[in-house]
Amino acid sequence: MHFSNIEGIRSYSLFGESQHLPDVLHCETIAERSVLHDWELAPHRHARLHQVLLITSGGGVAHLDGERHPLFAGALINVPQGHVHAFRFTQHTEGWVATLADELMDEILVRVGDVRRDLARPAVAPAPPELHQAMAQVWAEFSGRGKARALVLRGLGATLLGWVARAIDEHDPADAPAPESGLVQRLEALIEAHFLEHWQVADYARALAVSPTHLSRVARAATGVSAQRLIEARLMREARRNLAYTHLGIATIAYTLGYADPAYFTRAFTRDAGLSPRSFRAQVAASVAAHAGP
């Protein structure tokens, strides 16, 4: 297994699927999909999803951005969005895969110091007992239909990510935060303030008194994606929230998001999400109906 043909690597929205995340987060057993592929998953990436795997028994090999990592019982695997990964598990390996959308990551990773930097590192590390407990709770809550399920899953998702960041740092401490890390935090604050104005990278660079090239380099080093992608992603997240949680017409949403032409918004959204705004809204409605309690 290798990564020589990066252009041929498929990009998925969900672990092994080309569908959108149907819930606050998704959780399934490692065997659920692996057994369908003879316990081997070819190189792929998730453009907008972060994954955490926990192996409770068994093992295998993980390839994270071209680096080979042996897997073992008690291993935590952190797969940030956009990173190429592949797995070969030994038969009957047990454990879970938790998948979190970037919308949830944005809600959780606010004013949490350098945790985002740790979570942006693909890694395999020993999982502490607390992480085992958190993952088991995620699985139990995801599989159930209890009251306030979405709220509980959000909280458990934050707890899980906290233990992941701590485990990664304890296993392989990151270098001391560079002064440039503050630049990324200021960039994210500016994006939050101006994304509806459709500022470009050059606009943000000018406001931060740096060159666009430097800004993009620092953003990629800290988050794994370019400054341009951070800007686009914030706008598309807002679009998905409007489509999912309001009854506004698509044209109205386009104007609200600063698009002069609703048709251009539709093309931009379709390019980013892989389906049209209307289809996305229908998919969300079908997902809500499927996950509604009795």
Image (cartoon, helix red, strand yellow):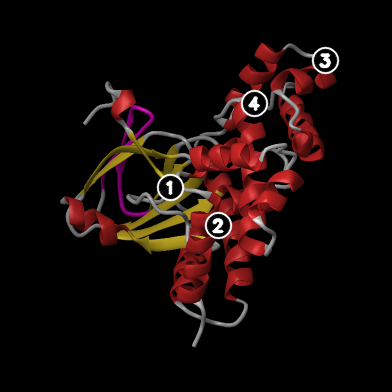
Q: Nearer the viewer, mark 2 or mark 4?
A: 4
Q: Are marks 4 and 1 in contact (CB under 8 Å)?
A: no
Q: 248 or 117: which is nearer to us?
A: 248
Q: Position of residue 25 (x, y in %)?
A: 51, 60
Q: Earlier in the sequence, mark 2 or mark 1?
A: 1
Calculate the distance from the C-alpha at mark 2 to the C-alpha at mark 4.
27 Å
Calculate the distance from the C-alpha at mark 3 to the C-alpha at mark 2.
37 Å
Q: Which residue is mark 4?
A: 227
Which amino acid type corresponds to the residue marked 2 in the rendered image? Answer: Leu
Mark 1 neighbour density, 10 Å: few (under 14) some (14–19) many (20 or more) = many
What range of the chain is rendered magenta? 60-74
Calculate the distance from the C-alpha at mark 1 to the C-alpha at mark 3.
36 Å
Q: Disc number at residue 13? A: 1
Q: Main secondary structure of the magenta part?
A: strand
Per the image, label 1 sits on a secondary structure element best described as loop
Calculate the distance from the C-alpha at mark 4 to the C-alpha at mark 3.
15 Å
Which amino acid type corresponds to the residue marked 3 in the rendered image? Answer: Ala
Residue that extends furthest to the bottom in the rendered view of this protein: 294
Q: Nearer the viewer, mark 2 or mark 1?
A: 1
Per the image, label 3 sits on a secondary structure element best described as loop
Q: Earlier in the sequence, mark 4 or mark 1?
A: 1
| Residue 137 in view of the camera | no
Tell me the quarter of the picture where residue 221 sits.
top right
Q: 260 or 66: which is nearer to us?
A: 260
Q: Which residue is mark 3?
A: 209
Q: Earlier in the sequence, mark 1 or mark 3?
A: 1
Q: Residue at x 82, y 38 (%)?
A: 193
Which amino acid type corresponds to the residue marked 1 in the rendered image? Answer: Ser
